Image (cartoon, rainbow, N blue to C red):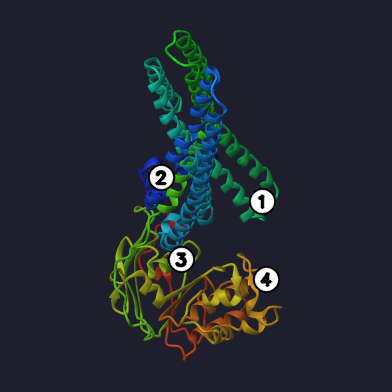
């Protein structure tokens, strides 16, 4: 069960979870809906009271029949009952509409919150878990919507009907008041005592479910790897282990739900029998009318039937709390700092200084040690290093994705710690791998920047030698790209990423392992576009090879810029 333990650990560690419990988090999530929730509860009170028209009418009807009443009062009772039930139905429809509006607002609010938060999540959150798999927890908002609606519509109504109904019974006879008290204690026992541990087991089941989903997504994310000899069997074995863990978690949770269902069913049988026996005796003793007995039986039977159904619906309540816990994992992800000030120096070129920077995932094994580097405005510098030496970490540090353990970095003579991150990333562009979004080629270059015109997009694509190739596609710049970048090739995607960087005219452009895998012609086009004397930006090229180009002023080995890292740090770079 090693794979299962690891998966469960990955869901619990480093993902922004806090000691906030699911119940408290649920109240926080719906805190902005207080007014509508109060309105729905008021509707439930009215519906609950109006619903008692049926047993009260039956009581009056039985009394009329028993003592031989006239037909006219019966007609009046029928009209009143029709009116009360019609009004209750209308209020129920209005209540349903209010809850539907609340569901929509909840969805919009969660989407808006996550859209704002996810781009600002700290980079180390993604060191231990794949970001898209983590975002899968968003789908739990649907569970929150549905179960919360069920509780507001059915749960509140049932609860209020129970309170009002039991109060009516209490007025009938003191013995029925005692019956009410015993019934309330029994209901509390089933909900609280028999339901002990249900929230914990529901959350555990949810974690196991996401572990299975993560394994399946990994198979889909690396199809070639799992087509190799033996890999498919490995995938099945791991999926089997995770599935067993889910089944065990589900079984543990269902044991709690099942004993509550048994408790509610048993309570329904005992209460109905006890009420009928007690009520019959009181009728024989002349202390209760036949109509009151029938009304009491209707009230209690309706309540107990509702609660027996609610026993199964309690599973939805536990799913709600587990869903809120999962949404909390996203909402509690640590965010990047918001401190610092913006500068108005953009477009004047950028000096970049790395002063004694050290970075380590493990303090005993630094990846970068005492790195020193100075780039003057408009200078073009290359740094060569092998895989795992820390090139990508250096790029992360330059744009504030990570913070050095010691030392600091300056942009235009200003410490990055004094600048807001938006200002840093407006002036420094990092090109790394494939950052294709599902959209048109033009959208992938523009990325929603209002300052980027269609003419600027075409000019950037011309600079990297890509425009003519794109125009051979059926839809030209409107061609829709998949998340993998298809129908563009890997080399075309890298040039597209360079075009995205240059179109914004930043002060500093950093290429992180972008040029190594390009063929010589594509690499020359990209270098000519980046290193042209017409552009005033500073360029830092990080790669495995020391590229020779007339526009590159200096080339370093990363190991020459500081103390050599410990050999064991080679595997530390993400």
Name the residue carrying label 2. 26
Instruction: Please tell me whether mark 3 or mark 4 is closer to you in this view.
Output: 4
Residue 457 screen position, x and y as percent: 55, 83
Residue nearest the viewer, comparing 150 with 198: 150
- Residue at mark 1 to residue at mark 2: CA–CA distance: 40 Å
- Residue at mark 2 to residue at mark 3: CA–CA distance: 40 Å
As helix, strand or loop, the secondary structure at mark 4 comes to loop
Chain-order first, disc 1 or disc 4: 1
As helix, strand or loop, the secondary structure at mark 3 comes to helix
Chain-order first, disc 2 or disc 3: 2
- Residue at mark 1 to residue at mark 3: CA–CA distance: 28 Å
How many numbered marks are there? Answer: 4
> Mark 1 packing: few (<14 Cα in 10 Å), some, or many (20+)?
some
Horizontally, is 505 left or right of 254 in the view? left
Name the residue carrying label 4. 487
Tell me what residue is drawn at x 42 percent, y 12 percent.
287
Residue 451 screen position, x and y as percent: 46, 82
Q: Is residue 449 above or below residue 243?
A: below
Name the residue carrying label 3. 392
Chain-order first, disc 1 or disc 2: 2
Locate the N terminus and report the quarter of the image it occupies: top right
Residue 318 screen position, x and y as percent: 48, 37
- Residue at mark 2 to residue at mark 4: CA–CA distance: 44 Å
Chain-order first, disc 1 or disc 3: 1
As helix, strand or loop, the secondary structure at mark 1 comes to helix
Horizontally, is 364 left or right of 253 in the view? left
Chain-order first, disc 2 or disc 4: 2
Q: Is residue 16 above or below residue 160?
A: below
Name the residue carrying label 1. 226
């Amino acid at each position: 069960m090693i794979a299962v333990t690891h998966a469960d650990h990955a869901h619990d560690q480093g993902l922004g979870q806090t000691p906030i419990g699911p119940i408290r988090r649920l109240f926080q999530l719906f805190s902005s809906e207080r007014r509508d929730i109060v309105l729905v509860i008021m509707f439930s009170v009215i519906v609950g009271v109006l619903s008692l028209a049926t047993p009260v009418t039956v009581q009056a009807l039985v009394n009329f029949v028993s003592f031989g009443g006239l037909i006219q009062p019966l007609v009046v009772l029928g009209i009143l009952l029709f009116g009360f039930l019609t009004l209750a139905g209308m209020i129920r429809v209005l209540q349903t509409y209010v809850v539907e509006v609340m569901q929509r607002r909840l969805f919009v609010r969660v989407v808006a919150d996550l859209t704002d938060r996810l781009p600002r999540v700290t980079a180390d959150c993604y060191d231990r878990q794949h970001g898209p798999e983590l975002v899968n927890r968003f789908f739990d908002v649907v569970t929150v919507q549905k179960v919360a609606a069920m509780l507001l519509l059915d749960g509140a109504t049932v609860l209020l009907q129970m309170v009002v109904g039991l109060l009516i019974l209490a007025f009938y006879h003191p013995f029925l008041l005692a019956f009410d008290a015993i019934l309330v204690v029994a209901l509390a026992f089933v909900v609280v005592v028999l339901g002990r541990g249900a929230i914990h087991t529901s959350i555990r089941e949810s974690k196991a479910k996401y572990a299975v989903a993560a394994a399946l997504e990994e198979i889909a994310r690396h199809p070639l790897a799992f087509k190799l000899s033996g890999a498919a069997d490995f995938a099945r074995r791991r999926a089997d282990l995770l599935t067993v863990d889910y089944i065990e978690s589900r079984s543990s949770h269902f044991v709690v739900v099942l004993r509550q269902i048994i408790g509610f069913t048993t309570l329904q049988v005992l209460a109905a029998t006890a009420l009928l026996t007690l009520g019959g005796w009181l009728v024989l003793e002349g202390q209760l009318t036949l109509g009151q007995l029938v009304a009491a039986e209707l009230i209690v039977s309706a309540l107990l039937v509702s609660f027996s159904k609610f026993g199964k619906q309690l599973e939805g309540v536990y799913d709600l709390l587990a869903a809120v816990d999962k949404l909390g994992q996203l909402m509690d992800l640590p965010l990047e700092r918001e401190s610092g000030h913006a500068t108005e120096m953009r477009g004047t070129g950028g000096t970049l200084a790395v002063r004694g920077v050290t970075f380590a995932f493990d303090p005993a094994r630094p990846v970068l040690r005492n790195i020193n580097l100075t780039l003057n405005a408009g200078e073009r510098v290359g740094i060569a290093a092998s895989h795992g030496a820390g090139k990508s970490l250096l790029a992360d540090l330059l744009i504030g994705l990570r913070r050095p353990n010691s030392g600091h970095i300056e942009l235009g003579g200003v410490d990055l710690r004094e600048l807001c991150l938006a200002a840093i990333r407006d002036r420094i562009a990092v090109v790394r791998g494939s950052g294709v979004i599902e959209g048109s080629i033009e959208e992938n270059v523009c990325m929603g920047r209002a300052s980027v015109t269609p003419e600027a997009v075409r000019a950037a694509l011309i600079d990297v030698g890509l425009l003519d190739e794109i125009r051979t596609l059926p839809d030209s710049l409107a061609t829709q790209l998949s998340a993998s970048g298809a129908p563009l090739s890997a080399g075309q995607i890298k040039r597209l990423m360079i075009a995205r960087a240059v179109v914004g005219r930043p002060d500093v452009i950093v290429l992180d392992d972008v040029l190594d895998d390009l063929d010589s012609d594509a690499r020359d086009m990209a270098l000519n576009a980046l290193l042209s004397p017409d552009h005033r930006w500073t360029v830092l090229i990080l790669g495995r090879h020391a590229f020779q180009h007339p526009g590159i002023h200096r080339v370093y080995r990363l190991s020459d810029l500081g103390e050599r890292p410990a050999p064991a740090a080679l595997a530390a770079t993400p």
